[in-house]
């Protein structure tokens, strides 16, 4: 337990929309240790993003406790949370969220704008440069987002997320907008960063993304359904079933097309 | 290790997590790039402020020029001068203040001279039409003025040649005269080439010795005509030539332009006492001083400035509403960006400040553009012939005030959009389409 960087205890999140009450999370207990790479999976609406926002200190739980690096984050004020997000958390989004008019380097530098401990002008620049180099974009420093491919954009976003050497790197469907080749490229990058000692949490729908992680947490209806190592998860997961189902559908489709011709 | 880190973090937070110079540089840089990226929109938005500042700058420049011109003209005329006229009060029974009680008396001039410490000199003036004769010419109905020696000081006209009247001339009522150049020409008394000095002329049949020539420059303000021939004789002599009623006025000069107002008050006091007027009696005389004209101009100028201020106020208001509108558009366009900024650690205060800075940058740029246009208008004013605006200029206070006002508009009208931006929830903002 002393090894856990993240400790969730009885986390619940309730949304009220009009008269309706939505239980997005219903008592989640979760420990994540230093330098783990965890996939969070589950069907749509199961509460993945809600959990992610909670872990990323963008949101506070309705009830329950969240300890990040030994500090009780769930009781913190908005501005304290902003500081935590600035210094201890890196976010990667599905749609990259780069500023269109800023160069790759300026985009990576963005979190430093809100930091008072990032040193002088040169230190800031060098930090952003080295982050870009870590994601292999040392040669795209001055490119604008519209001059970069999707994979390159996501790498800029990853550089921005790891800039402050965060305690956790979070990614909500980071490959959702990418093709399979680029997905592999980005996953390789995540794996490399993980090997360098980074704790990573990835929300995903894709089994091959989850397969790159050590650990897979499955949610259903706001609760943890399973929390297994990637190998164990593969055995019990509906993955094999799904693969077979896909095959069957394809075969049926082929037959149908043959029948028409 | 975690525990060791906690206190130092607290310390950093205790310092209020101050926004650094980097934040401000970045924020202003981003504001500029935002403005540049939406050039047309920004320009149209700032137009209200540009026009407002430009027009008020030009008006202020014109007024400054006009004021400088008018003041320098007053200065050359002499701001220390006072005139006293008889004045019959309007709204009292005529019987109470007949003309005899209103007209000025020599004793009153003497009293003013003796009792008003701020008066340096005074002279009664009478003008009487007389027939004037030289060796060769005869002119009927020429104006002859009776004066004291202090008249030269009081109206600012020196003796160019010869000498002024002395006290002895006055006391003994010597028949001596001063003339102006026009009189010399008209009477043709420059035959021997010494400009009329030492010639004799006949005034109403009496022989007068011309002892000096008075310069022609005059107080244009008071409607005297400088082109006419003028003759001056000692007041005591003029008094003898007159019988009964005559119109008299006083010309006086204060010790300096600064004491002119005081001098006026003293004259009024002494005059009322001389005439034994009761506290609720109206003045039976009128004291005119140039400071009145200057004050009138100054109040006119400040009236125009106030109107210009009103115009600029309205255009800044209109401009400000435009700014607010465009900033609201900007906030809604950039909702995702705001969400991202919050996700990477921007506090609400930082977002607020950032959008305020953007609004202020826009308005201050508009203000500067307006100042430049206003300055160009001021320069072109100086080239308008006959407009008397050669000295039109934009004073430093107007420059500073324009910038401060523009920035103020940015803060005032940028506040609501900036506040809106700062209140956005990062999760919702990032979900925004
Ligand atoms: N702001 C909100 N207001 C009301 N209900 C919400 C809000 N955010 C999420 N929910 C609800 O909470 C539940 C969990 O949502 P969440 O976004 O966490 O799902 P998810 O697992 O990320 O789904 P997906 O895979 O589609 O992204 C859903 O039923 C959703 O409708
Ligand atoms: Mg989601």
Image (spheres, rainbow, N blue to C red):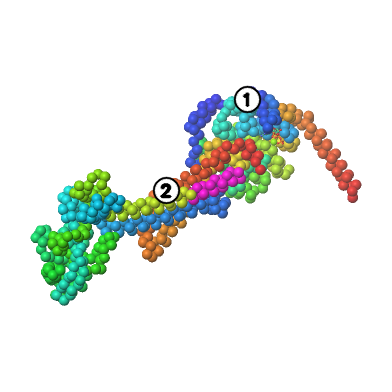
| Labels 1, 2: front one | 2
* Residue under pointer 2: B401
Q: Position of residue B423 (x, y in %)?
A: 57, 37
Relative to A93, say whether A11 is above or below.
Answer: above
Which quarter of the rendered picture does the N terminus of chain B lie within? top right
Q: Position of residue B366 (x, y in %)?
A: 49, 51
> Is residue A165 found left or right of A26 in the rendered image?
left
Residue at the spot x=80%, y=34% of the render?
A: A240
Residue at the spot x=63%, y=35% of the render?
A: A169
> Is residue B29 found left or right of A147 in the rendered image?
left
Q: Position of residue B41 (x, y in %)?
A: 57, 52
Relative to A102, say whether A245 is above or below.
Answer: above
Whether residue A208 appears in magenta in the rendering, the answer is no
Instruction: Answer yes or no: is residue A216 visible.
Output: no
Check residue B323 in the rendering and tell me which mark sits there, or answer none: none
Range of residues picked out in magenta: B315-334
* Snapshot quadrant of residue B66: bottom left
Local SS, label 2: helix
Relative to A10, say whether A187 is above or below.
Answer: below
* Residue under pointer 1: A65
Chain label for disc 2: B
Q: Position of residue B340 (x, y in %)?
A: 60, 40
Rounded to the nearest angstrom, the CA distance separating label 1 from label 2 is: 55 Å
- What count of labels does the image hold? 2
Which quarter of the rendered picture does the C terminus of chain B lie within? top right
**Few, some or many residues within 10 Å of mark 1 (<14, 14–19, 20+):** many
């Amino acid at each position: 337990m002393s090894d856990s960087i993240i400790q969730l205890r009885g986390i619940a999140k309730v949304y009220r929309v009009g008269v309706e009450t939505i239980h997005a999370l219903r008592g989640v207990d979760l420990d994540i240790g230093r330098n783990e790479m965890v996939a969070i999976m589950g069907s749509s609406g199961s509460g993945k993003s809600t959990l992610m926002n909670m872990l990323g200190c963008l949101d506070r739980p309705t009830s329950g406790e969240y300890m990040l690096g030994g500090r009780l984050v769930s009781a913190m004020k908005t501005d304290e949370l902003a500081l935590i997000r600035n210094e201890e958390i890196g976010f990667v989004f599905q749609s990259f969220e780069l500023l269109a008019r800023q160069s790759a380097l300026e985009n990576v530098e963005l979190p430093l704008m809100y930091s008072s401990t990032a040193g002088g002008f040169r230190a800031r620049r060098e930090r952003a440069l080295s982050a870009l180099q870590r994601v292999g974009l040392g040669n795209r420093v001055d490119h604008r987002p519209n001059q970069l491919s999707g994979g390159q954009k996501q790498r800029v976003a990853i550089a921005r997320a790891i800039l402050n050497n965060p305690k956790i790197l979070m990614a909500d469907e980071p490959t959702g907008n990418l093709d399979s080749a680029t997905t592999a490229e980005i996953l390789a990058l995540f794996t490399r960063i993980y090997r360098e000692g980074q704790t990573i949490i990835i929300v995903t729908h894709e089994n091959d993304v989850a397969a790159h992680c050590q650990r897979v947490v499955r949610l259903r209806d706001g609760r943890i359904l399973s929390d297994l190592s990637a190998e164990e998860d593969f055995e019990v997961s509906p993955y094999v079933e799904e693969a077979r189902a896909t095959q069957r559908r394809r075969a049926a489709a082929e037959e149908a097309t043959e029948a028409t011709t | 290790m975690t525990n060791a880190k906690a206190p130092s973090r607290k310390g950093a937070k205790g310092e209020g997590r101050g926004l650094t110079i980097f934040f401000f540089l970045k924020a202003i840089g981003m504001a500029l790039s935002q403005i540049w990226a939406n050039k047309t929109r920004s320009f149209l938005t700032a137009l209200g402020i540009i026009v407002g500042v430009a027009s008020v700058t030009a008006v202020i420049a014109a007024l400054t020029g006009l004021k400088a011109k008018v003041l320098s003209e007053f200065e050359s005329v002499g701001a220390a001068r006072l005139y006293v006229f008889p004045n019959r009060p309007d709204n009292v029974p005529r019987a109470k203040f007949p003309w005899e009680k209103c007209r000025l008396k020599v004793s009153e001039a003497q009293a003013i001279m003796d009792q008003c410490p701020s008066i340096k000199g005074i002279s009664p003036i009478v003008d009487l039409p007389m027939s004037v004769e030289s060796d060769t010419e005869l002119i009927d109905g020429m104006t002859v003025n009776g004066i004291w020696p202090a008249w030269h000081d009081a109206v600012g006209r020196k003796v160019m040649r010869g000498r002024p009247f002395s006290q002895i001339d006055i006391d003994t009522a010597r028949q001596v005269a001063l003339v102006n150049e026009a009189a010399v020409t008209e009477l043709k008394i420059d035959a021997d080439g010494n400009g009329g000095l030492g010639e004799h002329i006949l005034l109403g049949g009496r022989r007068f010795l011309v002892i000096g020539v008075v310069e022609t420059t005059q107080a244009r303000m008071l409607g005297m005509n400088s082109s006419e021939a003028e003759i001056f004789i000692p007041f005591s002599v003029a008094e003898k030539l007159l019988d009964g009623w005559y119109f008299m006025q006083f010309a006086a000069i204060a010790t300096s332009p600064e004491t002119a107002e005081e001098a006026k008050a003293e004259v009024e006091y002494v005059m009322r006492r001389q005439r034994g007027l009761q506290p609720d009696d109206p003045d039976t005389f009128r004291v005119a001083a140039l400071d009145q004209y200057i004050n009138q101009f100054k109040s006119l100028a400040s009236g125009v400035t106030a109107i210009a201020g009103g115009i600029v106020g309205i255009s800044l208001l209109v401009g400000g509403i435009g700014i607010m509108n465009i900033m609201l558009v900007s906030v809604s366009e950039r909702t995702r960006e705001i969400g991202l900024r919050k996700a990477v650690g921007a506090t609400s205060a930082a977002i607020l400040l950032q959008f305020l800075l953007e609004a202020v940058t826009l308005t201050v740029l508009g203000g500067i553009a307006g100042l430049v246009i206003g300055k160009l208008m001021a320069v072109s004013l100086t080239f308008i012939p006959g407009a008397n605006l050669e000295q039109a200029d934009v004073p430093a206070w107007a420059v500073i005030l324009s910038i401060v006002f523009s920035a103020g508009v940015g803060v005032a009208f940028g506040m609501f959009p900036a506040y809106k931006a700062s209140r956005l929830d990062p999760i919702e903002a990032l979900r925004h389409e």
